[in-house]
């Protein structure tokens, strides 16, 4: 399928910005729509000021089967014809472009705010007025005598990040769910564009605090690609180990949270404790329970000495022994299965249409996994099989997590025994000017994309972060209608999306 | 049934002995930072520029002082001083009753004292808290949630997180307080019946953390909300939070009175 222009862009390989074909708007429009129709996926689409009043739009596409990336650029004024009507994957990217750049995608079917903030990447001094009123927003409503509305958030019932959910319901049955986010918006992209390198990595670690290794890994990979810095195999392996321990911690925690939601208390208690074991292991490696301080440009901030690797391996072997019976007992329990089966099913065609990533996609038998399709670092040498299930419901998302837990455990146990040699960290110099780097990572929630464009001085001109949750919040909204309102917490936990990662 | 009991026995009892021990940390753990003025001659330039946070500042007299509340617990904060004057201890207790209590020349903090007798009689054995995340990364929330697991088991001290501010005795605020959450933070506080506590958890809630200076955040809990307990960390270890709460409630032997 590699039939698009090939500017030489690959996962974590930078190209000159000039190598990205710059097309007139109508050709750009057609190229992207045709590519997506042929199976390419829109992994990032964003704008940056070009000259006064002109915005450069950049679309990055991925062909998962061939492991190829491509990009197209175009320059627009204050509006352009929207891609969304022909390419639904673009819907949120285009809303984001309208909000960040003040450029209107004409004909977008539902142009509403994403995070509710004033334009921060606009080319015009006075961009067209956007609806970023922080307090007021008219939610979609269904009329009818017996239809009622339920509003939840931004302050939720549990210890959860803020977000607003508006249900249109008929009795217990959900007819429509609208999700309004942006409450966690901290201006992350602007900070990553302006902070110097040492401070920027601390911001990258805080894009989503449960995905420290994932986001810091993508950040450092983009910086290293632009600086032509080559990590040692040892550093790559340590990063891979940390990424999989992060996946273990979160997947185990998610199974525990789901167990709690269906009142299966032993599962909630055991998984909750075993999540902590994984965090403790990250703390041993990095000094912090979430792995902060470990991933740094040029490699890793902490080496993994042989005795520490041996002890870590022993801990994981013990964890594996404790974990398997708990997972088998929970997911083999008839009342747990009955509670999870058929709830919150995501239709596979919606999954493809909306560009869903990570475990929710794999639970619909859509085998998207960056580690396998766009392999990088240690994953080029040690393959982790892609874990899939087919039903697309809460149970399927649990089964995918269970499989991934076992496979990540196997991977880490194996890698800890065969750590390659080399320095933990090498120099990472100045960034090449006027280049584009795209770094993809398979975080535990799915595909993380950091796309970075440098200017003529080698400073960062535009930093685009795409968290898997950016795509996947739409999946939750699509999976809910037809379910009972009381199933929402369960459904929500089975996706366990990031508010901070979406809101940036 | 037999298998069920076997798994239960295999899992064992894992609750931490804290506060009676149980606070052992690995060698690389970064707890409360300290500053050894003996290693700093105050002449070599550049440490403040190399410092990735506002941990180290020069006070009015030009002397270096540490703001533990601003600490991001990043390895680079220790390496910013080439003479090794800044180091991380393995001490997890560092919560204070006042913002100023986090500032000192050497990193020693004024550990939180207990609430007055009336507040202790109200909350000492039963405290209900409402969590408000406002411009955070979900790291602090992860640790607040971890307090509920069988290891830390916050409930054994009579402290619980509840679903509504109307049911709460206090708020736990995390995050740098984003523009989009500003209003919700105030309204949640107003919805909590007095007398009420406010606990600021994490570097973001204390001074903006890694997002300090962004146009989209307020650099932490607004000054007009009365904070009763400041808990530093990025994110704080669950035991740092637990230690602070127990001190506030007068439940730690050395903090009583």
Image: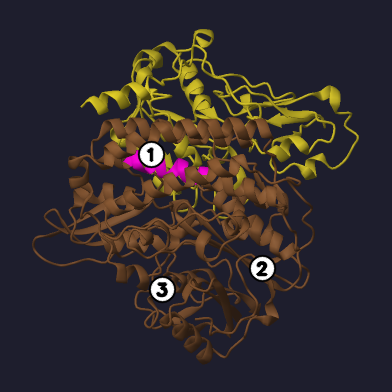
Q: Name the residue under label 3.
A: A89
Look at the image and give the residue range highlighted in magenta: A245-257
B48 in the magenta segment = no
Q: Which residue lies furthest to the left in this view?
A: A145
Label 3 lies in what chain?
A
Neighbour class for label 1 at 10 Å: few (<14), some, many (≥20)? Answer: many
Label for residue A159? Answer: 1
Q: Are callouts 1 and 3 both on one chain?
A: yes
Q: Which of B1 and B129 is in front in this view?
A: B1
Which of the 4 image quadrants contains residue A281? top right
Mark 2 and mark 1: span between their CA atoms?
A: 39 Å
Residue A295 makes an appearance in the image: yes
Q: Mark 2 points at which residue?
A: A13
Q: Counting residues from the N terminus, which is met first, the one under dot 1 or under dot 3?
A: 3
- In this rendering, position of residue A395 left or right of residue A215: left
Q: Which residue is drawn at 49% across and 11% down?
A: B20
Q: Name chain A's colour.
A: brown
Mark 1 and mark 3: span between their CA atoms?
A: 31 Å
Label 1 lies in what chain?
A
Label 2 lies in what chain?
A
- Magenta-drawn stretch, dominant element (helix, strand or loop): helix
Residue B191 makes an appearance in the image: no
């Amino acid at each position: 399928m590699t039939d698009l222009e090939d500017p030489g862009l690959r996962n974590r390989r930078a190209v000159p910005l000039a190598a990205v074909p710059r097309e007139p708007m109508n050709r750009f429009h057609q190229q992207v729509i045709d590519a997506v129709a042929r199976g390419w996926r829109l992994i990032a689409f964003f704008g940056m000021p070009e000259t006064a009043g002109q915005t450069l739009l950049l679309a990055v596409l991925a062909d998962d089967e061939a492991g190829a990336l491509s990009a197209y650029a175009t320059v627009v004024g204050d509006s352009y014809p929207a891609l969304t009507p022909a390419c639904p994957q673009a819907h949120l990217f285009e809303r984001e472009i309208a909000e960040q750049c003040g450029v209107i995608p004409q004909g977008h079917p539902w142009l509403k705010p994403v995070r509710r903030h004033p334009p921060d990447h606009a080319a015009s001094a006075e961009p067209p007025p956007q609806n970023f009123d922080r307090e007021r927003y008219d939610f979609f409503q269904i009329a009818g005598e017996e239809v009622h509305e339920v509003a939840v958030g931004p302050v939720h019932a549990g210890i959860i990040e803020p977000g607003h959910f508006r249900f249109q319901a008929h009795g217990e049955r959900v007819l429509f769910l609208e999700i309004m986010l942006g409450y966690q918006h901290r201006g992350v992209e602007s900070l990553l564009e302006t902070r110097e390198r040492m401070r920027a990595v601390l911001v990258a670690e805080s894009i989503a605090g449960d995905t420290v290794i994932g986001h810091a890994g993508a950040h450092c990979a983009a910086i290293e690609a632009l600086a032509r810095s080559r990590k040692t195999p040892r550093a790559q392996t340590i990063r891979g180990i940390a990424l999989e321990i992060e996946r273990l911690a979160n997947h185990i925690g998610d199974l525990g949270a789901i167990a709690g939601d269906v009142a299966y208390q032993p599962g909630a208690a055991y998984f909750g404790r075993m999540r902590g074991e994984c965090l403790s292991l990250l703390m041993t490696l990095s000094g912090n329970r979430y792995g902060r301080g470990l991933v740094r440009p040029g490699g890793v901030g902490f080496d993994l000495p042989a005795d520490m690797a041996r002890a870590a391996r022993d801990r994981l072997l013990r964890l594996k022994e404790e974990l398997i019976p708990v997972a088998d007992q929970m997911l083999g329990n008839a009342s747990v299965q009955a509670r999870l089966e058929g709830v919150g099913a995501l239709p596979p065609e919606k999954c493809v249409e909306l560009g869903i990533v990570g475990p929710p996609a794999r639970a619909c038998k859509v085998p998207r996994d960056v580690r396998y399709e766009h392999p990088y670092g240690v994953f080029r040498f040690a393959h982790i099989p892609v874990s899939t299930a087919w039903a697309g419901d809460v149970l399927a998302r649990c089964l995918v997590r269970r499989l991934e837990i076992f496979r990540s455990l196997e991977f880490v146990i194996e890698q800890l025994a065969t750590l390659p040699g080399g320095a933990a960290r090498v120099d990472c110099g100045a960034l090449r000017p006027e280049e584009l780097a795209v770094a993809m990572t398979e975080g535990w929630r799915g595909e993380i994309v950091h796309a970075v464009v440098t200017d003529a001085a080698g400073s960062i001109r535009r930093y685009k972060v795409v968290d898997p949750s950016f795509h996947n919040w739409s999946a939750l909204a699509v999976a809910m209608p037809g379910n009972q309102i009381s199933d929402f917490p369960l459904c929500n936990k089975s996706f366990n999306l990031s508010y901070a990662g979406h809101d940036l | 049934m037999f298998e069920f009991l076997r798994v239960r026995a295999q899992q064992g009892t894992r609750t931490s002995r804290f506060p009676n021990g149980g606070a052992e940390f690995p060698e690389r753990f970064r707890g409360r930072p300290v500053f050894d003025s003996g290693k700093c001659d105050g002449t070599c330039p550049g440490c403040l520029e190399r410092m990735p946070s506002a941990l180290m500042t020069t006070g009015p007299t030009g002397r270096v002082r540490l703001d533990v509340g601003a600490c991001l617990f990043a390895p680079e904060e220790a390496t910013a001083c080439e003479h090794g004057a800044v180091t991380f201890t393995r001490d997890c207790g560092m919560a204070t009753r006042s913002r100023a209590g986090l500032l000192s020349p050497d990193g020693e903090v004024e550990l939180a004292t207990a609430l007055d007798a009336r507040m202790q009689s109200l909350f000492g054995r039963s405290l209900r808290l409402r969590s408000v995340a406002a411009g955070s990364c979900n790291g602090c929330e992860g640790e607040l949630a971890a307090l509920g697991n069988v290891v830390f088991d916050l409930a054994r001290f009579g402290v619980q997180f509840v679903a509504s501010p109307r049911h709460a005795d206090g708020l736990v605020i995390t995050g740098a307080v984003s523009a989009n959450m500003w209003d919700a933070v105030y309204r949640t506080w107003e919805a909590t019946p007095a007398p009420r506590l406010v606990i600021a958890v994490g570097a973001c809630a204390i001074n903006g953390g890694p997002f300090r200076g962004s146009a989209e955040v307020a650099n932490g809990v607004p000054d007009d909300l009365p904070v009763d307990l400041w808990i530093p960390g990025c994110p704080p270890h669950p035991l740092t939070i637990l230690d602070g709460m127990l001190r506030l409630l007068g439940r730690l032997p050395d903090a009583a009175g």
